[in-house]
Image: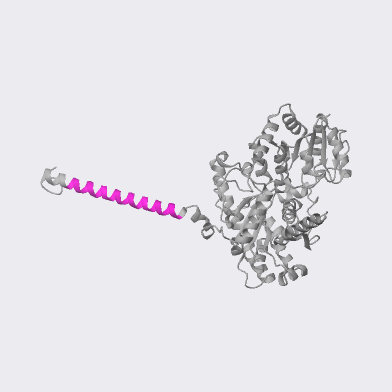
Amino acid sequence: MKTCIVFLSILVATRLLSVCSGYRILGVFPVNAKSHNIVFEALMKGLARRGHRVDVITHFPLQKPVKNYHEIVNLDGSMERLVNNYSMKFVKEISLVDPVENMVMLYGNRICDFMGFDEMQQLINNPPTNPPYDVVIVEAFMANCYFGLGHVLKVPVVAVCSSGAYPWLVESSGNDDNPNVVPSVFLSHGAGPTMTLWERVKNFVSNRRDTSKFHALTGDYQTKAMRKYLGPDVPDIREMEKSVALTLVNDHPVIFGVKPVLPTWVHIAGLHIEENDEHLTPELKRWLDDSVHGVVYLSFGSMVLVESLPKEQLEEIYAAFAKIAPMRVLMKVVDESVLPAGLPDNVVTMPWIPQIPLLAHKNVKVFITHCGLGGILEALYYGVPMIGVPLFADQFRNCRAFAEKETLIQINFKELSDKVLNSALERITRDHSSYKEKAVHYSKIFKDQPISPMNSAVFWIEYVIRNGQALRPPTLDYTWWQLAGLDVHLIILFAFVLSSAMIFMSVKLMVKTISKLIIRNFYGTDKVTKKSQ
């Protein structure tokens, strides 16, 4: 009995020591995009489960409590909801406007003013001291003003990018993406040698234009916002961006290609999948198990409403789905009542679907997606071939990347019809489809890593807490044109032109001198006279 008591005492003491040795972490996620938050929530849960205390500012409170996870500011209701709130009409409208300007105005500058909320000001002016924060983790999207919290709290900043790596984020982190190799997040180009000369020109111009536009739109406004809400001594926004000690990016070489990256630029794609705790409902699991002929899953993500498609297109989709019976179809539809009549018998709709465990089910054969990054990563992880119907933003590039791997068939939204969709479904679901083989192949590569994305993220966050900006890259002190070597190339070009000119003048002078010598020796004079002629 005494031995048991001693053992339990040691176990409890060890557990308490592990908890006490954990760090205190502040997570700030001011954008109310559910697809973005899935990554942030997974990261913060992972840190909490590893013994760290995490305090989170978010629009999305947890449905189930997690030990060491504390929501200290709930931003829900501070801006219009995005979940299940994008109609196809709205999608068409936003596709016509400049994406950088649109996102900065909607999800950047105005979000900086959330720092003026009473709860935020209380945290800024009276941060906890027992224990104090060791690091602040901030979403890297459009509101980089929140990087200034690191200056106020005197702790390192870790940026997390759940969407595409935007060119201004790449630049401010010190990475040097070569536009001849790495496609812009806003273009539908492939990577590396698949880009034509004209695509490389457009890629370069797009990167420079978008970065300059982002800087122009955010520089003055977000600097003023930081100094208004955080204090007058906060450096300007560009300096705050360069002060970030670590950037976690939802990327992996198998997705957009291999490129050189700095140690402070860490890939975490798949982080939200490996420790996901969602489960299929008993009814849905039973339906999937009974779908022995396979399931086609259609979802346009957490924001876009499938039921808002034009009636004619929905009827075309119905016709294509009816033709693949007895194969079944599962559609994410929030409001089935607005669908046109005639839904085929092999089609089931649900307003909410646990997507990760669904894609993990062996009977799911095809994923019809708008190519949001989270969804295609989940399909990649489980080796599910896709039909991509990109709608806006980075979805076109995401779609192109997987189409080039032949794990996805891309359909232009305007051309979505019975004939086109049926053809794509037939090609993918055909016996021994090469699309399935390629999907499984790339899934194996994606999973074959020396350390899991979650453990990698946790290690590097703890590294930054211990060492700060020990790995600050020298590239941060150079401009883009210096990193591209334009000044060096200009000097070399100038030296080449100058030396060529000097050689030309020397040769010309030499020829002239030799000519004079020949004339003098032949005619006895420097000039040819008429008489001598």
Pinpoint residue 332: horizontal percent, then vertical percent.
82, 43
Magenta segment: 487-516
Residue, far front: 2
Q: Is residue 120 above or below residue 378?
A: below
Asked whether residue 227 appears in the rendered view, the answer is yes
Q: Residue at x 62, y 59 (%)?
A: 464
Image quarter of the N terminus: bottom right
Does residue 10 belong to the magenta stretch? Answer: no
Specify whether residue 407 is in view. no
Question: Which is the main secondary structure of the residues drawn in magenta?
Answer: helix
Position of 418 with respect to 487 (left or right) is right
**Residue 122 in picture, x, y percent from top left:** 75, 71
Q: Is residue 488 magenta?
A: yes
Q: Quadrant of residue 117?
A: bottom right
In front here: 205 or 297?
A: 297
Return the x and y of residue 15 as percentages of the image width and height: 75, 57
Residue at 12% over, 45% down: 521
Q: Position of residue 491 (x, y in %)?
A: 41, 54
Looking at the image, the residue that sits furthest to the top is 431
Q: Between 452 and 17, which is closer to the camera in this rendering?
A: 17
Q: Which quadrant, please, contains the C terminus? A: top left
Residue at 69% over, 56% down: 103
